[in-house]
Amino acid sequence: MAENDGQEKTEQPTGKRLEDARKKGQVPRSKEVGTFAVLMSGVIGLWVFNSFFRDAFNKVFHLCFTLKRADIFDSQFMVNSLLNAMLIVLVPVALYGIFVIFFALIGNLFIGGFNVSLQAMAPKFNRLSPLSGIKRMFGMQSWVELIKSILKVLFIGTCAYILIRSQFQNIVKLTNYQFTDAIVHALYIIIKIAIGIVCSLIPIAAMDSWFQKWRHIEELKMTKQEIKDEYKETEGKPEVKSRIRQLQYQMANRRMMEEVPKADVVVTNPTHYAVALKYDQTKPHAAPEVVASGIDNIAMKIKEIAREHKITIIEAPPLARAIYYSTGVGKQIPEGLFAAVAQVLAFVFQLKMYKARRAGPPRPLPKEFDIPDELKHD
């Protein structure tokens, strides 16, 4: 049982849990995959750089075992020979080392990927405790690693013995070859045995890779309560989210009310719905736009602001409901309502001209507007 309120950690870790663990340096790593990558790259490197090593060994042996009479009396001969031999093998050994290191890095990053954690680099003084060290030495994980190492040594040792025994006759025959040919055949035998030994690591690396991933997930598993707490932490408490939504709603309404004085007309239900429309005649191909809309208290507030700014209010219940349900604030009305809204705007503009004594009285609005069935709302 887990210590977290007696709940078992049965739930898979969330993305945040995995990301937090990664920041702490907790990523799955497989030593066996890294070992396999080093050995396999080493064997492949021997095969790739075979000619380099062969030529270098030939030069070194000729340099070290070819003596002139004068060299015997030269006190610096051995030192110079050693330096020259080192220079001869430096290039192939350096290339081989770079090749192996490159694939060793890839192998170690194959499980868990690249990860740099400053938290993991920070000193942890609890690790200096002798008691903690003893617990780690005799803990379950240490025993598992010990048993795994013993089995691995036995398995690989058995494979190595079988491979060397199978090549024993070829090893003995090396004494029958000339020196340069012996080097070539020796390298061939070494590569052949090494490939067999490395291939024996494949099942071990595969099993350890799966085990490390599984153990990493098991260590990060969560209880249901931990998931709930994390959700509250990341998404916010319900009451806080409700308050935020309320504030956002109030701000949106405030901005909407500031647009009402710019409207040309307000179409109402008359009590439950109100929509404020604006038509910019200077824009080509422009359609009337809803600058504010609402029901009940918001509708009353829209009408109140409209009266304060002497904006015409038209009572047309079906049209008000159609506009409210089909068009959002800041959007243009749908094409199906163009004719009805055009009649309303024409009436409003004629009314303004009449009040300014520049035209006669406007034509009265029809009792019913032509509204498509798909835009009607009861």
Image (cartoon, rainbow, N blue to C red):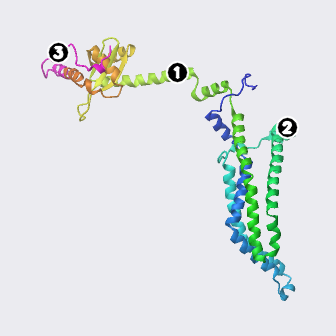
Above or below, 86 relative to 327:
below
What is the secondary structure assignment of the residue under circle 3?
A: loop
Quarter that holds the N terminus: top right
Q: Which residues are magenta?
A: 349-378
Q: Give me the disc on residue 243.
A: 1
Residue situated in front as seen by the camera: 82 or 42:
42
Residue situated in front as seen by the camera: 228 or 293:
228
Which residue lies most toward the left here? 360
Label 3 crowd (10 A; few <14 / some 14-19 / many >=20): few
Q: Kindly report which numbered mark, 2 or 1, lies closer to the viewer in this rendering.
A: 2
Whole-percent x and y of residue 301? 36, 16
Tell me the kind of residue under disc 1: Arg
What is the secondary structure assignment of the residue under circle 2?
A: helix
Say whether residue 271 is visible: yes
Residue designated by label 3: 364
Above or below, 208 relative to 361:
below
Tell me the kind of residue under disc 3: Pro
Q: Give me the disc on residue 209.
A: none
Which residue lies most toward the bottom here? 69
Q: Is residue 77 magenta?
A: no
